[in-house]
Image: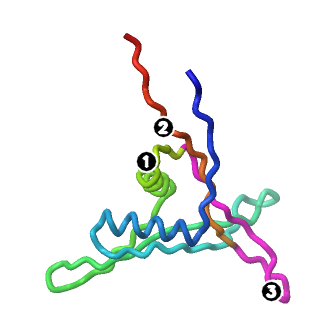
């Protein structure tokens, strides 16, 4: 039996946010706009301290509770994103194995200050195989 090979798929930031917005809009039955927040953070301690980029994907929507509308903000964890992309790609017969953020820190501007960036994600996917049963 032939083993399914891992396929790499790149999704840009704009396309990812659009895909997730459409997915959650359909799932929740209202217009959802997924956004990203990127920031540079220090990690580690002492001599092992280093600068890293944290990416947060989230969406907000209004929910009526009696006479009041409250805003609910939902942060999408990595498992949420992986699950959403699994649902989206399952129609194409693919399963998401892992996701990696295309992120980092670069020097920007006249004084070359450090700036965090997020350009999208990289996926490792496999084609779903047909299960064979022995008789």
Query: Bounds of the magenta span?
Result: 97-116
Tag 1 and tag 2, C-beta contact below 8 Å: yes
Residue 89 drawn at (x, y percent): 47, 51
C-alpha separation, residue under disc 3 versus residue under disc 1: 42 Å
Q: Earlier in the sequence, mark 1 or mark 2?
A: 1
- Asked whether 80 or 133 is in front, the reply is 133
For label 3, the residue is: 109
Tag 3 and tag 1, C-beta contact below 8 Å: no
What quarter of the picture does the C terminus occupy?
Answer: top left
Residue 25 drawn at (x, y percent): 35, 69
Left or right of residue 49: residue 53: left
What quarter of the picture does the N terminus occupy?
Answer: top right
For label 1, the residue is: 90
SS under mark 3: loop
Point 69% across, 62% down: residue:
43
Point 27% across, 69% down: residue:
29
């Amino acid at each position: 039996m032939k083993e399914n090979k891992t396929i790499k798929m790149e999704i840009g930031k704009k396309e990812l946010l659009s895909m997730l917005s459409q997915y959650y809009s359909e799932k929740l039955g209202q217009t959802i706009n997924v956004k990203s927040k990127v920031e540079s953070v220090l990690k580690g301690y002492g001599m092992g301290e280093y600068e890293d980029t944290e990416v947060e994907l989230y969406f907000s929507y209004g929910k009526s509770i009696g006479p009041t509308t409250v805003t609910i903000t939902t942060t999408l964890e990595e498992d949420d994103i992986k699950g959403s992309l699994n649902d989206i790609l399952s129609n194409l017969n693919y399963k998401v194995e892992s996701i990696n953020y295309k992120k980092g820190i670069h020097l920007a501007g006249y004084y070359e200050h450090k700036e965090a960036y997020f350009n999208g994600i990289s996926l490792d996917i496999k084609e779903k195989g047909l299960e064979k049963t022995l008789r």
